[in-house]
Image (tube, rainbow, N blue to C red):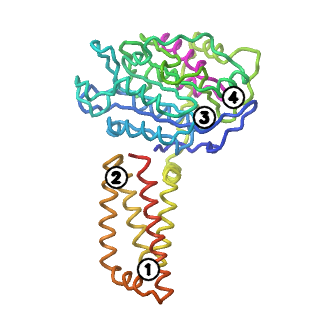
């Protein structure tokens, strides 16, 4: 996952805010690719995805276990589809999902289809690209209350087709409450069927800069996706030769609702007075459109980063870790050396998968192979006493050991299920 700051509050339960309650959990999949293997490298895509991940966790309470950031060499076609499948499996009907992609895009004039280009794609080989039709199928398959897809890539507007436009965004907590309860499928693209700017090296792209600025600036009140879209479209077009597009997506399950963003510590929105958009547009027109250094400072020092990263990893793998502990206990009661043997074997498997970022079928086959080697090693030392215990029907203690051994095997099977089921 990511090593950004842990959220101030836990989003596993519904979020209490003044005026109304946001249902479910919030999930983020952020993809950023600079170091393409065959295509022209980019400068700022990884920074864009990383900054989006950071601001949603530190300002909007996206829980670390629900955030996946994949960049550069990780962002293969196989990995991206594995994460799509993970969302389909994990997301619940009351949850909200945000998908962000920053990288190269392509439009095929023959098939009138746009594509995302993963890191391992051969330039010009459309078979290596991810078509909009597959992205639409993924959005349709995710069983969320709200899904919001953001694409900062050339020709990304082709995903919309002939989408309906949006009018003036609603405001006020009562409006936000109403639209937050209605299913929605929205998209925001950095341009229409056009080339978009990557920006100066080391900075955000013009599109992502306006997006991140708005997200960082909203610290007091809730706002809905239409408000964000209106701001980003206007400010990006004012600062770059591209025209962002944002609206509900067609034929993927939109029912007229909106993704609502609730900043940490948000106050109830006032019904009157100058809107946040008017204030921000005034700042932009007055020449003060810049990123405040205090807002863009790193939210977490280097000393605390490993602790937060470990905490995030432990929460992500909580079920597997629990079953490691139980299987260690049961096997350890059967044979004292198993207190050392079992956790070393299982943690070794998890460490290798994490270190080499194994996923999908590769992770599955590696895990089964490693466990097979561990089981063969176990039987070398323990098969005879285990067989003797099972054969001695008159000895309660030995039969008890067989029962304990069986419970350990059950926990080991549970480890396999929970460790592998979310990745295949």
The crowd level at tag 4 (other Cα within 10 Å; few <14, some 14-19, many 20+) is some
Q: Name the residue under label 3.
A: 60
Identify the residue position indicated by label 1 in the image.
335
Between disc 4 and disc 1, the foreground one is 1
Where in the figure is residue 7, as x and y percent of width and height?
A: 60, 42
| Depth check, front residue: 141 or 284 | 141
* 3D distance between C-alphas at marks 4 and 1: 58 Å
Q: Main structural element of the magenta stretch: helix, strand or loop?
A: helix
Distance, label 2 to label 4, CA atoms, is 45 Å
- Mark 2 highlights which residue? 364
**Quarter of the image where one finds residue 168:** top right
- Rounded to the nearest angstrom, the CA distance separating label 1 from label 2 is 28 Å
In terms of sequence position, does the residue under pointer 4 or pointer 3 come before the other? 3
The magenta segment: 212-239
Q: What is the crowding at mark 3: few (fewer than 14 residues within 10 Å), some, or many (at least 20)?
A: many
3D distance between C-alphas at marks 2 and 3: 34 Å
Identify the residue at image location x=72%, y=14%. Answer: 274
Which label's residue is closer to the chain start, 1 or 2? 1
Q: Does the magenta stretch include residue 125?
A: no
| CA distance separating discs 3 and 1 | 48 Å
Q: In the current view of this chain or complex, which residue is farthest to the front?
A: 393
- Choose the circle earlier in sequence order: 3 or 1: 3
> CB atoms at circles 2 and 4 under 8 Å apart?
no
Instruction: Describe the element under mark 3 as helix, strand or loop.
Output: helix
Say which of marks 3 and 1 sits in front. Answer: 1
Relative to 349, say whether 220 is above or below: above
């Amino acid at each position: 996952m990511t090593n950004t700051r842990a959220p101030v509050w836990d989003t596993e339960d519904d979020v209490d805010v003044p005026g109304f309650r946001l249902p479910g959990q919030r999930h983020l999949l952020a993809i950023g690719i600079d170091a393409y293997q065959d295509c022209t490298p980019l400068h700022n895509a990884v920074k864009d995805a990383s900054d989006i991940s950071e601001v949603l966790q530190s300002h909007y309470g996206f829980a670390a276990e629900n955030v996946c950031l994949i960049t550069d060499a990780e962002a293969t076609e196989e990995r991206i589809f594995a994460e799509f499948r993970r969302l389909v499996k994990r997301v619940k009907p009351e949850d909200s999902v945000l998908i962000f992609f920053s990288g190269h895009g392509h439009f095929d004039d023959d098939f009138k289809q746009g594509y995302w280009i993963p890191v391992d794609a051969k330039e010009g080989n459309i078979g290596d690209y991810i078509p909009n039709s597959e992205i639409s199928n993924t959005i349709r398959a995710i069983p969320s209350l709200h899904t919001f897809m953001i694409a900062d890539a050339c020709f990304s507007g082709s995903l919309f087709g002939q989408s309906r436009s949006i009018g003036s965004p609603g405001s006020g907590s009562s409006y936000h409450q109403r639209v937050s309860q209605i299913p929605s499928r929205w998209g925001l693209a950095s341009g229409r069927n056009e080339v978009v700017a990557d920006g100066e090296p080391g900075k955000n792209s013009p599109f992502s800069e306006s997006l991140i600025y708005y997200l960082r600036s909203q610290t007091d009140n809730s706002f809905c996706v239409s408000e964000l879209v209106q701001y980003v479209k206007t400010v990006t077009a004012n600062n770059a030769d591209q025209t962002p597009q944002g609206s509900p997506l067609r034929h993927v399950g939109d029912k007229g609702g909106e993704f609502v963003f609730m900043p940490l510590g948000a106050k109830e929105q006032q019904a009157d007075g100058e809107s946040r958009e008017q204030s921000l547009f005034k700042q932009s027109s007055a020449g003060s459109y810049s990123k405040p250094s205090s807002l863009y400072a790193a939210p977490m020092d280097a000393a605390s980063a490993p602790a937060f990263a470990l905490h995030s990893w432990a929460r992500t793998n909580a079920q597997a870790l629990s079953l490691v502990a139980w299987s260690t206990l049961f096997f350890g009661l059967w044979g004292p050396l198993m207190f050392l043997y079992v956790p070393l074997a299982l943690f070794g498997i998890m460490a290798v998968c994490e270190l080499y970022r194994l996923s999908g079928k590769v992770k599955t086959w590696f895990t089964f192979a490693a466990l097979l080697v561990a089981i063969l090693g176990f039987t070398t030392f323990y098969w005879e006493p285990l067989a003797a215990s099972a054969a001695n029907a008159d000895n309660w203690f030995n039969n008890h050991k067989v029962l304990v051994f069986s419970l350990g095997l059950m926990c080991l099977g549970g480890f396999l299920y929970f460790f592998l089921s979310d990745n295949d």
